[in-house]
Structures are given as C-alpha cells and as structure tokens.
Amino acid sequence: MFGELLAPQYLTWLLDGFLLTLVLSALACLFSTALGFPLCLARLSPRRLWSWPARAYLMVFRTTPLLIQLFFWYFGVTSLLPEDLVAWLNMPHEVALGPAHLEWPSFEFIAGLWGLTLYTSAFIAEEFRAGVASVRDEQRAAGLALGLKPAQVWRYVILPQALRTALPPLLGQYMNALKNSSLAMAIGLAELSYASRQVETETFKTFQAFGIATLLYIATIAVIEVIGQMLQQRKRFRRGVI
Amino acid sequence: MDFTVIRDNLGYFLLGAYPDGPLGGAALTLALSVLSGLASAIIGLGLGVALTLIRGRRRLPLLAVLGFFRAIPVLMLIFWAYFLLPILFKVDVPALATVVCALSLIGGAYLAHSVHAGIRSLPEGQWAAARALGMRPGQVLRLVILPQALPIMLPSFLNQWVALIKDTSLAYVIGVGELSFVATQVSNRVMVHPTEIFLFVAVVYFVFCASLDLAAGLLARRRSRRRQVSA
C-alpha cells in the first residue's frame, strides 16, 4: 500500500505547492485584517449610511460558499472586465522593489487572493466586533469622563481590551484562511491540495501524496496555535496592552 | 446582464436531471446538508458528552482526533474519504456517501466542542443535586443536563448547518451533481454569461444560509433576553 518513497521531483511539487499555500494565506490574512478592521468600525457606526452597507457585506460574504465566490471572481468578473485589462493582468510583469525583483503573480493567484481576502475579512470583522462588544459600556463612559476624546477612548481604553479578547478567535480565522486557501485549486492555482492531487494522479501513491499534504497543513495550523499560546502567555498581553 | 440563461436552465439548477435522472442541483445541496447535518449532530453530541465524562489521560486521544478533524481542510478530507472508504469497506462507495461522511466528521468535530461548552455552562449544582437524588451518571445526563443544555446549543447547531451548506459546494471536486457542480456544468456548456450564472447560484446559497443564520441569531437573542428577564 505504501510502496517506495516519492521521487524527489514529486516532493518538489508538493513543496512548491506548500510555499504557494503559505504565501497565499499569509497575504490573505494580512489584507483581510486590514480590511476587516474598518469593516467592523463601519458595522458599529451609529450612522446607517455606514452600518447598513457593512451589514450587507458581512451577510453576503459570510453566507455564500467561498468556492462560488472564487468562481464568480475568476470566471464571472473576468468576462465583465475590459479585455485590455485582463490581458495586462495575464501578462508577466516585473515589479521592482528597490534591489528586490518580484515576479508578477499568475492571474489565478490574484483572483484567489482577492476572493479569499474578501471572504476572510467578513469573518475577521465579526471577530473584532465580538471583541469590541465584550468591552463594557461603562469603560467608554469612564474614559469620556476622564476627559479623553472619543478617538482616545478607542485607542487607549476599548481597543487594548477588545484585541485581547479577539486574539484567539482571530487566530482561528487565520487557521480557517489557511484551510480555505485549498479551494483555490478549483480555479487552477497550483497550491498544496492541487499539487497533492497532481502527484497522486502521476504516481498513484495516494497515501504519500495526501499524507504529506495533510501533515503540512496540520503542522502549519499547529505553529499558529503555538504562536497564539505564546502571545497569550506574555505579561504585556495579559495586562491588555497590545 | 442577460438572465435568460438562468430562466432556460432553472429546472436544472434547482433539481438537476430529476425526474429523468438522479436528483441534483439545489435540491441535492439541501439533501446533502440535511444528511450530514443530522449525522454531525449525532457525532457531535456523542463526542461532546464523551469530552465531558472522560477525565484525565484518556481524554488526550479524543482531543487529538478532534484536533485532527478541525485542522484538516475539508477538501483534503473529501480526498481521503474518496480514496480510503472503498479500501476500508471493500465495496464501491458512492461519491454522495463520501461527501456526507467527510462533512459529518468535520461538522461533528466542531460541534463536539460546542456541546461540551454547552454542558459545562450549567452550574455544577445541577450534577450534584441529581446525583444526590440517586441517579446514575447516564440518567443525570439524559434527564437533567441535556434537556437544559440542548436549547443553549441550538444556535451553534444552526450555525454549523450553515457552514455545512456552504461546504457541500466542495462535493463538486469529486463530481457530485449538486448546485456548484451544476453551475460549472451549465457555465461550461453555454460558454457565455458566467457572471449571471454564479451570481444566481450565490443568491440561492444566500437564501438558504441567510435564513438559517437569521433564525440562529433570533434564537440566541431570545434566550439572552429571557435570561435577563428572569435574572
């Protein structure tokens, strides 16, 4: 059933896929946190002009499957964009960042990152909201009574406590983003799941192909878990200062 | 935007080839989610109760299994089930059963922790009082604890069901003819209007999930309001 070990060539495929998975999910986490925070603020805003669109966004992106969202961005929106732009996106470019040259990512990568970011940001916004909701109203009142401006109340009173509460679920969402990045294989991005499927069809060594991929996913999740535990053990964190 | 492609294929989107062929489309999505929802509720209840009752070192293997199913992407588990189930049972397992199996295991692993948390949320005195009345642990659980804990857990069961409906879309990768599969099929056949097709499919999922989501939210809010009144 196990047979010989995988040839190095196939291990390279899996490793490349793993790297792509890591880059995709790390970028998606970064962007969706940056997007999720203003979303949460808009959702909490007393003005309907802000809160209703945010509410609609959260509802739509949380209740439709990521797979359909990816198909929508990859197949659907591409057919609406002007042809020149799609051609430009598909062309390889070089982005020069000082001495480093970045290779232009494939169109599948851009679509996958875009879809995964929007999807994850909705969940992250909800986690932030739960964190802010966990801070009692009296805290805000006390901050204002001390003469802090509303922005200062946010910065020095609400956020430190809210982020402390939101950190564990936030890390949970990062884990979800990592797991969800596997769906990008459906639009042809050669990440870890795609690579394992490919190795399996080429070699018929199903146990090894899926086994290695599964281990890599679980190991990465475990690393995120350990980082979370370490952050929560820190003294600064326990005092609510982030 | 041209939605005639939706109108022409509406029956196919909603029911698949039924009644001339197997059930598919949105109906199959619902059927899959109901089946795996029920299975994961049973698994979740069983494992959640086990988490509560088992103490000490024997708990570790259980936690490891739950951790495994929570850490593995749904897609990978569907691959594993697709490949392993026929080897284990020595028969041809239909793709439908594969998906239900994978989804219920993942759903069950998530629910187990909610069930455990729900049971733990009851005061210790409930256990002590029931034991003092001379009940056996199984009776305490069945007659005292679960009747109180189940309503608390109901919103998380509904939320898990929403997640399951969304996850049934992954059945597409092993060729189960549910809504997402049907959508890609139609999209590949007509070659035009992919935007309209995926928009329509997203709306169908939205209607399913958003109504469940609202129901879960209402239930949770009613509970907390009742608790405030009684407190």
Image: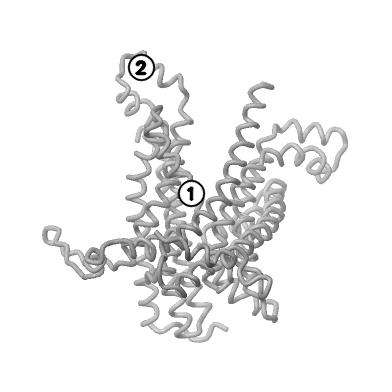
A18 w.r.t. A137: above or below: below
Q: Identify the residue position indicated by label 1 in the image.
A: A62
Which mark, by number, is residue A144? 2
B96 w.r.t. B208: above or below: below
Q: CA distance from mark 1 to mark 2?
A: 35 Å
- Across and down, in percent, residue B146 comes to 75, 41
- Among the 4 quarters of the image, the one containing residue A124: top left
Which secondary structure lies at badge 2? Answer: helix
Which residue is drawn at the image coordinates 34% and 36% (left, top)? A242
A195 w.r.t. B48: above or below: below
- How would you rate the neighbour count of disc 1 (Cα within 10 Å): few for under 14, some for 14-19, many for 20 or more? many
Circles 1 and 2: CB distance less than 8 Å?
no
- Across and down, in percent, residue A127 comes to 46, 41
Q: Quadrant of the C terminus of chain B?
A: top right
Q: Amino acid at mark 2?
A: Leu
- Across and down, in percent, residue B121 comes to 66, 36
Q: Amino acid at mark 1?
A: Arg
- Across and down, in percent, residue A16 comes to 34, 72
Which residue is drawn at the image coordinates 87% and 33% (left, top)? B133
Which residue is drawn at the image coordinates 69% and 53% (left, top)? B41
- Give the chain of mark 2: A
- Look at discs 1 and 2 and give the one toward the viewer: 1
- How would you rate the neighbour count of disc 2 (Cα within 10 Å): few for under 14, some for 14-19, many for 20 or more? some
